[in-house]
Amino acid sequence: MVSLVCKARSTLARGVWIVGLSLVSGAMVACGGTQLSQAPHEGPPVRVEATGDVWTLVAEVPESGWQWSIEQTRPVFDRDLLYVAARRPNPLFRYAQNPVTQRLRTPIPSFRPIEVWVAVIGFDADMDDAVYARALFSPPATTETDAQADPDATR
């Protein structure tokens, strides 16, 4: 009888230890997340356009050489968050000083509202130091019921 009680206590303690470790590791991952700034976006102007059934990010940059990449998307209750890195041009190369329109197709459906956060970073900067600023919020282009009611409308 004593042996059964000791084994039960040992199993219970091991279970509590495992749950505690998973909670601590989950909190550490959550704390090491995306850095957001309350300051307004100060990079190249951006907007979104509905291209077919998804959003396309459109940036007006002062010169070619800018590199845009989607770092992550996060669906939340009433909108989708889009985190984008805008990497400055390589200073070792010369670029034409002409304004350029760059487009980045996103995986976010255009019937969902979108909130875009942009981190403007140096050409060789590390993404761990990136700080995202809110660039824009756009309501949905169409409603989901409209898109489902007539799927051939975009063809």
Image (cartoon, helix red, strand yellow):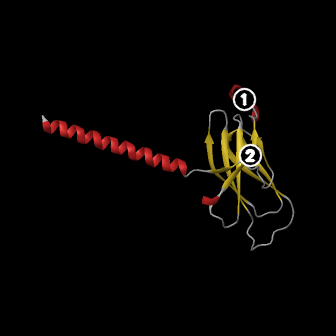
Query: Where is residue 2 shown, x and y percent of the image?
Result: 13, 37
**Residue labelled with disc 2:** 56
Side (left or right) of 24 relative to 70: left
Screen quadrant of the C terminus: top right
Query: Where is residue 4 shown, x and y percent of the image?
Result: 16, 36
- SS at mark 2 in the image: strand
Q: Residue at x 71, y 50 (%)?
A: 133
**Three-letter code, disc 2:** Thr
Query: Where is residue 115 shown, x and y percent of the image?
Result: 71, 42
Q: Residue at x 67, y 55 (%)?
A: 131
The extreme bottom residue here reads 92
- State which quadrant residue 123 falls in: bottom right
Q: Are marks 1 and 2 in contact (CB under 8 Å)?
A: no
Query: 72 or 103: nearer the eye?
Result: 72
Screen quadrant of the N terminus: top left
The extreme right residue here reads 98
Query: Where is residue 100 shown, x and y percent of the image?
Result: 83, 58
Q: Which disc number belongs to residue 143?
A: 1
- SS at mark 1 in the image: loop
Side (left or right) of 19 relative to 113: left
**Three-letter code, disc 1:** Thr
Mark 1 surroundings within 10 Å by alpha-carbon count, few (fewer than 14), some (14 through 19), many (20 or more): few
